[in-house]
Amino acid sequence: MTPLIRRFVRSPAGIGGLAMLLALAAAVVVTPLISPYDPYALDFGNALMPPDAAHWFGTDNFGRDIFTRIVAGAVYDLRLATTCVFGPMILGILIGLCAGYYGGWVDDALMRITDIVWAFPFYVLVLTIVGVLGPGEGNLYIAFFMVNWIGYARIVRGETQIIRRLEYVQALTILRFGPARTMLRHILPNAVTPAVVYSMSDLVLTVQAVAALSFFGLGVQPPAPEWGLLIVESVDYMRDAPWMTIFPGLAIAWVGVAFALLGEGLATAMKPKG
């Protein structure tokens, strides 16, 4: 067991967050095998049924089992969140690495672009891009790729500027190691830690952003069981069938808390020992 894993295992927050995500993953795998309900099939005879032994989370206005739809929706939300975070993360890391290592006009050019995008509020940019391109899962990916890389570029740039002044990096330059080898093999592993920790909080915000965009009709479109859409469908029934709103909201909160705890565990495990 590596020291990193050993420190992570000793973190109650990290283990708790990991356990919550594994529980959700287990539900995604097991539910289609044991559930008698199709998340898309309509059953108006059982519409707006409260939670009971047959329907753990009740049914919606179309008679669809809410528990089954929430579990099916986890695939949409987690796929969107991870793709919209880790894709831009890779782009931002590469931009920050180049800016921090080369400095000079390369740094100026890349950081001016970063500052321009950074000047606009995140949600304003995403809403504008999706509004221009139109709603849909594919356009969500494009919007987040265009915006979500900024934080990672700034973080890695700062770390790279510090590391490139260290003696071992200067020695690599004297030994005529190529820039690509120096950056990817010797600087990146030491500069990426803060970006990895930041990505966990970014996942929390992205899950919420995806749900919010779906709520406003700019995200995933019906009849997909995406959690934001489930809340949209419940608006007219909040008084008569509050379970339609409560359980999708709890699902979003569950994933948010899980990633937050996981991020705290990673921060503890990756923290340099003084």
Image (cartoon, rainbow, N blue to C red):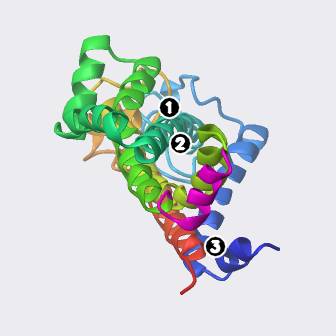
Residue found 39% across the figure and 31% down from its top? 144
Residue that badge 1 annotates: 225
The front one of 100 and 272 is: 100
Q: Nearer the viewer, residue 185 or 272?
A: 185
Judged left or right of residue 243, residue 132 is: left
Q: Which residue is mark 3?
A: 15
The residue depicted at 31 percent of the width and 13 percent of the height is 134
Classify 10 Å Cα crowding around label 1: few (below 14), some (14-19), many (20 and above): many
Do the residues under discs 2 and 1 have CB atoms within 8 angstroms? yes
Q: Amino acid at mark 3?
A: Ile
Residues at discs 1 and 3 in contact (Cβ within 8 Å): no
Residue 172 drawn in magenta: yes
Q: Earlier in the sequence, mark 1 or mark 3?
A: 3
Q: CA distance from mark 2 to mark 3?
A: 24 Å
Q: Viewed as shown, does residue 248 lie left or right of 235?
A: right
In screen coordinates, is 29 left or right of 190? right
Place of residue 77 in the rendered image (x, y in percent of width and height, measured from the top left):
50, 38
Residue type highlighted by circle 2: Ile
- Quadrant in the picture for residue 235: top left
Tell me residue 63's x, y (percent).
Answer: 49, 31
Numbered mark located on residue 70 in the image: 2
Secondary structure of residue under mark 2: helix
Span of residues in magenta:
164-176
Q: Position of residue 112 (x, y in %)?
A: 24, 35
Frontmost residue, 183 versus 210: 183
The quarter of the picture where residue 2 lies is bottom right
